[in-house]
Amino acid sequence: MGWAGKILRVDLAKGSCTPEPLNAKWAAEYLGQRGLASKYLATEIDPKVDPLSPANKLIFATGPLTGTAASTGGRYSVITKGPLTGAIACSNSGGYWGPELKNAGWDMIIFEGKAKKPVYLFLEDDRAELVPAGDLWGQTVWATEAAIRAKHQDPQIRVSAIGKAGEMGVMFACIVNDQHRAAGRSGVGAVMGSKNLKAVAVRGSQGVRVRDAKAFFEATTKGKATLAANPVTGQGLTTYGTNILMNVINEVGALPTRNHRDVQFEGARKISAEAMHEKRPTDGKANLVHNQACFGCTIACGRMSQLDKGHFTVVNRPQYWGASGGLEYENAWSLGAAAGIDDLEALTFANFLCNEHGIDPISFGATLGAAMELYDMGVITTKETGGIELKFGSAQALATLVELTGKAEGFGKELGLGSKRLCAKYGHPELSMSVKGQEFPAYDSRGIQGMGLTYATSNRGACHLRSYTVASEVLGTPVKTDPLATEGKAALVKAFQDATAAVDSSGLCVFTTFGWTLDDIAPQIDAALPGGWTTQRLLDVGERVWNLERQFNLAAGLTAKDDTLPKRLLTEPAKTGPAKGKVNELGKMLPEYYELRGWSKDGVPNKDTLKRLGL
Amino acid sequence: MKAVILGAGPAGVTAAETIRAHNPKARITLVGDEPHPPYGRMAIPYLLSGRIDEAGTHLRADPDHYRNLGITLKTGRALGLDAKARTLALEKGELAYDALLIATGAKPVKPKIKGLNLPGVHHCWTLADARAIAALARKGEPVVLMGAGFIGTIILEALALRGVSLTVVEQADRMVPRMMDAKAGALLKRWCQAQGVKVLTGTSIAGVEKGPKGLAVTLSTGKTIPAALLVVAAGVAPNIGFLKGSGVKAKQGLLVDAHLETSLPGIFAAGDVAQGLDFTTGALAVNAIQPGAVAQGRLAGLNMAGERVADRGQLAMNVLDTLGLVSASFGAWDGVDGGWRSAALDRDNFRYTRLEFLGDRLVGANLVGIGPHVGMVRGLIETGTRLGAWAKTLKRDPNRLPEAYVATLAGRRD
Amino acid sequence: MQRSLMIEPVKCTGCKQCEMACSMTHEGVFNPARSRIRVFEFHAEARFVPYTCTQCAQAWCQQACPVEAISVDAATGAKVVKEARCVGCKVCTIACPFGTVNYVRATGKVAKCDLCGGDPACAKACPTQAITYVDSDWTGLERMRAWAAKATATA
């Protein structure tokens, strides 16, 4: 009911696939997906393990609502220890892959060890098989999907795969399914590559059952109506996608530009959602072709874009002339503003290639921005870059380096280290705009104070998806708070963190929370699962998950010292916009946050806290 | 109008219903030669395997169906035909007609092999045959099946499901040689063997004698195997003996024109007895398949009722479930001159897809371990849809045919 | 007046709510593999096409059935599979030139769209009105039927 009740354990070294029952006690405490898989990971591996060693494990996990008709019930997460951060990593993806796994009758797959030679897992309902992937090694994500479908003669097989970046250990390599949906952050693709695991191909026909179909229908129908009536989830995201934020955040003065040198980008308009809708002067067509939903999603924020065939990036490259995943806000920012580039077509091209080769566009773009700053300072020259002029604003450099990074060639190999290691290598660690080694997403915490605390305390390194206080501080959901104020932000961050951890454990998309609170979600989960699920119970799950992740990170060797921001954000005031003159005042928020969490001044959960949460 | 339909199989029943739909006043007589309501031979294997009872084989579920439509059911066997007098001679009496449909189907062929008249040797064709087989094909008993053609292979499944110890003997080099190519035939054979059925291809039965289990079957290899039952499925021949001297022209079957009319005016033929227009070749052929029989029956009925409707030809096609392995063939599955092919074979997983094209049009297919939407193959072939760029895609991956279909035929509605 | 499913691919986002509604209604489980409507994805065109039976007048499936397991629902015009009579011979699956009758291994029978008895779950579940249940005249279905007539080798 909700859960399939079964997980697959794959020992890559032995080449064995063994089913086992889902730990029902843990499922009752951690719900599924992010929470439950984190519990498995934290229990089964030594937190100090080298993330790219065979001793790390890699878990693909669905939630209890994955594969159901609940709106957005199509998510899965990849949980492992992240190479980029050294922290617990949990990267969430949509598309159709997760529901396919659930339909095949599995809640999760745990990969252990390392295969002697490249393999992929083919899972068709109860049948699991490790298939040699020597011929796929070195292939792109897209080619891998096509080859696996052709080999097994089933075009409906869903494939989650790495590209060459994951094979070569690019530190921000991701895992891509359905061509442009990705478990994107923290370098989970590099872990997959380190295990000689090329892809996970699934085909399911067993279906997903819920506890009370009638109650579930009523709860999910009501939930869908709420999303449809909400201006963000019913219209804004549907029509414009997340990139509707480009102009909004730029106006707030929180659009990190040129490696956070600036907080506003003069080219924001040109790379915005509005621009994606406009007809290009060159060919009279718009960049945006259609929106696309992930499985079960009634919001459909996904973008499908088509390039101008005459654009320099794709001239004579017809393989990029079809439609593919278009720019989300984070990618438009990272591939654009972060490096000062305002060429929408080049950004879209770079986005295609990130998907094709399996690299995280946020970390890639941010690292490129950092490299450009080093180039600007003369620290990196064309000698290092192999002749590429790494100037801020260069669409040419972006187009060249996205390909080189995806293939881990030339200077792309350097970028593949991620900004922390790259900047350290060139003697300027302070220029890495990251927390715990993971690059910031698209919100400058000088202009949105709560996001500073969000980043500093995020268990997977800098991330907006751990507590999206932007919703409150900028968009006014569920209540409007002042983005420049620090008061109350500790509580806001904690509340968002716990609620998000619960949503991420359910199989639903966190974007629903623009329109839903846990009060909307609890009845849907309750109708799907036995045991009685209330809002409070979900909040408890969320807090438990958060503390479990924290415990893992502390055991891995991270400390309160890692809960911080780069010097630039703490000391260099914003130059323009509403936040002009402001730095992020993390110091005002962090102690209060620790206290609210029931943690010591050193950020360690108190015994009482752990006991209360059953940890 | 007096319409007489000789043969109460799918073609005959469909023709009778079609005539009634177009002519409320016609006097319609449907003559069958078995003492049951009209039934589908296609269903006999399912009767044998115990999935349905005899009522489940009936072509029409409602026992009053024919009476409600004013169709007179008659049991009898035809002895001859007087085309001039427009009368049909039955074992008991005569039937006068204005329009006659011969839908007498086919009967199983009994090869000239010693011992095939012994007790324990049966065809699997009629409900009576099915009862006899059911009595002998008991769990664990050794059973030999002669012939692994389309019909033989369907019977194979029913016998195997009864739990007998089954040996199949096929003289051709592979199973279902007229429906499947060598690769597909080999997949089927290996699949059957994996399910515990012995399949001997390139082997024939030399003779049958009485033996300790009932029968002793001697093979062309010289080996003799015991059998409690020998089922003979060595092909069928049209039931046209009674037409000798009638003037109705026949080759392999009764030759019919595009209106399903034989060489004699007012006399039509449809179904397994007819040699009609083949969609793929444009020549006359006996296709002997269920949907073709129904389609011909419908067309014959229309023409008998005075609607002039022409046959564009029947597409040869078959679908087969062999102990869970589903296979199908369509049209020119073995290719056409000047055409090209796209094929994918996965021996380990018993999947095979072979598409045959002429230009950018699909003309035939062999499929083993088939996925969904198999009927789209028929749709693409019969419409002669130009696949354009999709032909290239299908060349790379023939299994993307459903996408090609929707993109070219069905997807362009807005 | 007879009603039909009208499908407008341009409105479809590929969310598969229709597939889930269909499988839940007919099988009591969310299982796109068992849905009688399928959304085809044409990635490179950013196009999603829900596809199911048009309840064509020709009714090849019904005609081809050797045991009268497919009949017309007088109220809706839908061609409906009577599971109790279906023997699983699959002749209808090859006879239907639209490919919208499929064999279901789990049941040993065939399955196809039955318009849910006149209240199609897929149309109700569609969040973008890409699938609606409307008067037949509106659906452009006549075009499909014209095609069907052309397609037939027998009419």
Image (cartoon, rainbow, N blue to C red):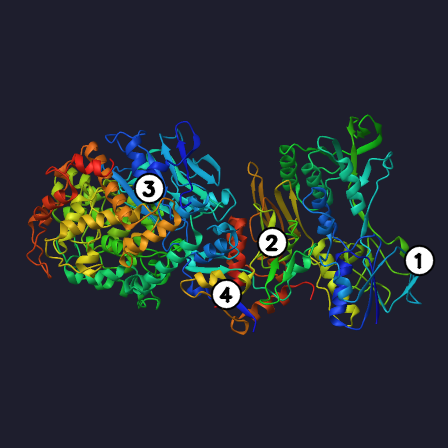
Report, in whole angstroms, how far the alpha carbon at label 3 lies from the one at label 2. Answer: 44 Å
Q: Which residue is most to the front? A: A532
The amino acid beneath tag 4 is Arg
Helix, strand or loop for disc 2? strand
Residue for badge 4: B412
| Quarter of the image where the N terminus of chain A is located | top left
The nearer-to-camera label among 1 and 4 is: 1
10 Å crowding of disc 4: few (<14), some (14-19), many (20+): few
Q: Which label's residue is closer to the chain start, 2 or 4?
A: 2
Quadrant of the image occupied by residue A386 = top left
The residue carrying mark 3 is A78
The kind of residue tagged 1 is Lys
Q: Judge depth for marks 3 and 1 and give the one in front.
A: 1
Q: Is residue A300 above or below residue A421?
A: below
Alpha carbon separation for disc pair 3 and 1: 80 Å
**Viewer-side label of 4, 3:** 3
Residue B359 at what x, y percent from top left? 59, 57
Residue picked out by circle 1: B92
Residues beneath discs 4 and 3 located on the same chain: no
Chain for mark 4? Answer: B
Under mark 2, the amino acid is Phe
Q: Identify the residue position indicated by label 2 in the image.
A: B357
Question: Which class describes the residues within 10 Å of circle 3: few (<14), some (14-19), or many (20+)?
Answer: many
Instruction: Report in which chain the residue with disc 1 lies.
Output: B
Secondary structure at badge 4 equals loop
Q: Is residue C25 above or below residue C119?
A: above
Camera sees residue B258: no
Find residue A470 and name its label: none
* Distance between mark 2 and mark 4 Cα atoms: 23 Å
Q: In which chain is the residue bearing label 2?
A: B
